[in-house]
Image (cartoon, helix red, strand yellow):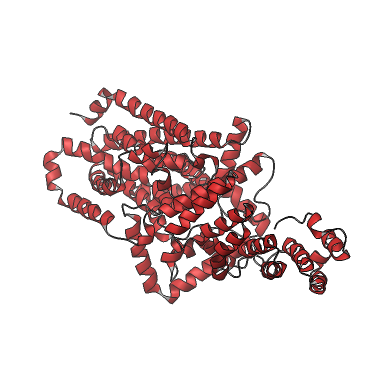
Amino acid sequence: MDADRLDRRFWWVDLLVVGLAAILRVIGLWTFESTSFALWPQVDAWTYWDQARQIFAGEDPFAAEGFYQPPGYPWFLAGVFGLAGGPSLTAARVANLALGTGSTVLVLWLGKRLGRAAGLPLVGPTAALLWTFYPRTLLFELDVLTPALSTFLILVLAIVAGRGTGPGRLLVAGLLLGLGAMVHATILVLLPILALAPLADRPRPSLRRWIVLCTALLVGTVCGLLPTAVRNWERWHTPTPVSYNAGINLYLGNNARWRETALSRAGLAFRDLALEAEPHRRSLPERDRYWMRRTLDEVLASPGGFATGLATKALWSVNRREIPRNEDLDCRTREGPTRWIGWMPVRWWWAFPSGVLGFVVLWRRAGAAGRVLPWLWLALHGVQVLFLPSDRYRVIGMPFLLLGAAAVPGWLLVARTEARRWRVAWGAAGLAAILPWLPIHPGTAFQEAWCLHLKGNHATSAGELPEAAVLYERAVALDPRDLDARRWWAEALRRLDRPEEAEAVLAPVVAAYPGSYPVRVLAARIAAQRGDWTAAALHQGAAYRVPGPRSEAGVRYVEVLVRAGRVDEARAVAVADPNVGSDPRVVRILAGAPSPSAIGVPDP
């Protein structure tokens, strides 16, 4: 049966798939919002949420430091808040879910186009159904993170660029590419793919026309990048087009101990590493260049190690186990109201070989569109090989892989004889079926301790300190190496007025991170709570001496020294640091009026 006729006959399947995608997202929002994950965004999600709130309030969260992360998503959220009448996590999620439903429609559209070009039926609805039932799709949309927006923009870009190779279309495609880079900077890897795509047409364009097309694409991209590029030049006099976090992210995955740094989460270890760039002396652009140079130095010092690392990360990137990061989405599907999302049937271990098989099929049957499709996926997927193998990088390339997988059922249906002849296709799929099952680093396994850590964070944010202390204690029992959980456990005990227990819990953290500002501050506060002003002075002095702007720490240090009876040392600190000595609180403390505890020195 003709593929195009079969698609028209089953038009109702398209509506059914899109309706199912919308219904699942409504159910997902309803169930997710009853969990603590919905109330307390973590790490990057919290950063985006906080930046968007500041933008909505008329403030500029990027004024002091610049664009550490691409600013497009906070700008988008601020616009959503404007429509919603104010900052709202629910509104942010509804916007993400609307984008996700839109992405389903775009996947359907691309699949129908590929199916017609290849003469294969129902590629569109099959791809849309696979995308709908891929659990990571919905989980990322429910978080305050970028994949929903970046995936939607990439799919729009693919449709615009694929509807012809005129200069006007490539100009628009370039504009979308530049705008997309303000959401997820690594989208720029698609630039060479789009530039070379016209050469896949038959007949190929002349050299002159191809140069015209590439110029249009480049002009569009530059125009799309102007909002951030101009700001970076005016503020920092640097030609960086978008953001300044590429350097440290590149280093995390490309240094002599990359297995350790690539798996590190936000916390004390990552903070200590970031401080090696001396942020008290360097601006954000200078820090970015520092990490770029350091990465290059390590690569040149051991090119063999770099190559081995890339090969290892390539294997990790196609493993059935999705490398956890700060958000570790598996924590949300192990128990509770959102457990059902983990039951959704699409899994990488079979989607990957199916996609590879489909790529070969479409390459041979779908013309230029089929030849460009695997390169789009490979470029987006390859980013995680260069940087960090993780879900957030994998998910934005998944629509293209699933489009390949969706071509397989129709191919087996309409080309049985042909399917048996294509040994190359079956060989590639067979190899791809083995790779996801190869063993990888044990540190990538699911960690129940991290889920308990996150729940402890939620309880702390909600002020439920007894529950938080129990959760952190359980996390440390499962993973004694999680010193961040131990630190927050000590903080919960301190706030519960159990300073002796807090001191014992924090001791290993102080030993491991003696130069950590937050650790020393916490230790000083615990010692002060116990009435041990000598120990409090020791820890507060160590915190004050950590490089950086430490005026508040200095004020607290003077107060603690006075409490410890070391007035001369307190005066010496005030004299040596004019910022501390001129503070009115310090003047009152050293003058002996009123009791320092009544002055209200804020906690650092």
Q: Is residue 575 left or right of residue 477?
A: right
**Is 487 rendered above or below residue 29?**
below
Q: Nearer the viewer, residue 287 or 444?
A: 444
What residue is at 46 percent from the left and 55 percent from the top?
475
Q: Is residue 315 left or right of residue 228?
A: left
Residue 596 picture quarter:
bottom right
What residue is at 39 percent from the left and 50 percent from the top?
394
**Is 116 rendered above or below residue 504?**
above
Residue 350 is at least partly visible in this image: yes
Residue 104 picture quarter:
top left
The location of residue 53, given as percent across then percent down, is: 63, 41
Q: Is residue 90 left or right of residue 103?
A: right
The location of residue 564, given as percent across then percent down, is: 76, 69
Q: Is residue 557 left or right of residue 464?
A: right
Image quadrant containing the C terminus: bottom right
Image quadrant containing the N terminus: top left
**Is 563 rendered above or below residue 410?**
below
The location of residue 547, given as percent across then percent down, is: 67, 69
The location of residue 322, given as percent across then percent down, is: 37, 52
